[in-house]
Amino acid sequence: MIIEPRMRGFICLTAHPDGCAQNVKNQINYVKSKGAIHGPKKVLVIGASTGFGLASRITAAFGSNAATLGVFFEKEPAPGKTATPGWYNSAAFEQEAHKAGLYAKSINGDAFSNEIKQQTIDLIKADLGQVDLVIYSLASPVRMHPVTGVLHRSVLKPIGNTFTNKTVDFHTGNVTQVSIEPANQEDIDNTVVVMGGEDWAMWTDALKSAGVLAEGVTTIAYSYIGPEVTEAVYRKGTIGRAKDHLEATAFEITDSLQSINGKAFVSVNKALVTQASSAIPVIPLYISLLYKIMKAEGVHEGCIEQMQRLFAERLYMNAPIPTDDKGRIRIDDWEMRDDIQDRVKALWATATTENLSEIGDLAGYKQDFLNLFGFGFDGVDYNGEANEMLQIPSISE
């Protein structure tokens, strides 16, 4: 079928398998260009199909020649209906990994469930024995709790007061004011259950109890802090409470891994265009201004640049892992440079519909958004027939 992007609000309803494959190949080529990383050899990535999780899997495989097992929850294709982009990303990744002689298998299902945890453990035991790195990169708006059976939904809300500030519709470029009513306690609690650290700890406990974590294992989850202009709706809002919980959980997991000399870290990453960030008011405007400045300074990074730097310059550099005063790895260091943030703040005050295309990088934002779904890549024939029924090798076996 010929596949075109079909937008509904902050979501693209279609994905292009050839474009997703090109996205994966571009990331692989970047990692290869940076040279070998003396890193992990057997890696589990929970949330492996898009964004930082996919980039982590690519970095481990093509930077360290690691065997990788990816867990994700993606919609399969049907005749005349595309899969979600993560499905096609994972199909392309496995194909490229197998070509390179690397072990790569995937599990598609609800990573919050006990069943998927057990299926993962069984596959590690059968194929890998143990893993030496566990990446936790789940991004889901809902979680069915495996113990209580309650379905929890996260919300994007401020805490305490109504939040009012600028935002942009990145499709049209219209800069407007947005107001968001504050969360109640139930909103906060649900968001922490979905996006906090409980499931990360459950995964770690299950893997450790099953004996599939190697001596000296590292596990890492991803977080974000961001600037003052977004903090009311992000770091000081409901998501921020969940991130606080995630970061506190890292210390609890490290304690639980003492017997095998394991450690848990949270990496604070850069603001990037994702399906999730596109839906958060204020964030698209912030990112468009940030991109303009960081590109001009030559320090702009996407997911793969961030993860390659995380592995090569933080996790696996044969030295103590540098952390901030709260024990977090900071790979958002370039974004949060004082000179960059001062310029973003100044541009924010002046941003309007009329001048955003000049002072910001809205075109770059739109390009990155389309890229998430496999659209807008050079070298892909978007007018030609594409195979929407593309399968993931290890899942179709």
Image (cartoon, rainbow, N blue to C red):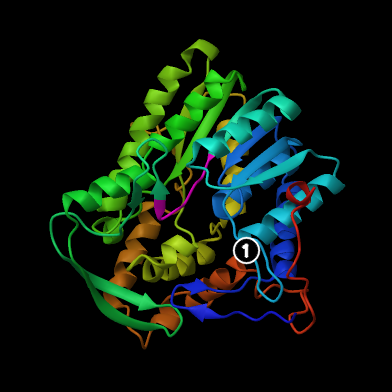
Residue drawn at the location 56% of the way across and 69% of the way down: 368
- Residue at (30%, 55%) from the top-left corner? 234
Q: Say what amino acid the circle numbered 1 marks.
A: Pro
Residue under the image location 19 percent in, 57 percent down: 183
Helix, strand or loop status at disc 1: helix
Q: Within the magenta stretch, is there residue 82?
A: no
User: Which residue occupies the extreme bottom position in the image?
Assistant: 354
Report the magenta residues as a range: 136-142
Residue that sits furthest to the left in the current view: 161
Image height of 86 relative to 40, above or below: below
Instruction: Give the quarter of the figure containing the N terminus.
Output: bottom right
Report whether 75 appears left or right of 178. right
Looking at the image, the residue that sits furthest to the top is: 259
Left or right? Give the position of 288 relative to 235. Answer: right
Residue 361 makes an appearance in the image? yes
State the predominant SS element of the stretch in magenta: loop
Answer whether residue 316 is visible to the viewer in this image: no
Residue that carries the numbered disc 1 in the rendered image: 85
Give the quarter of the image for residue 17.
bottom right
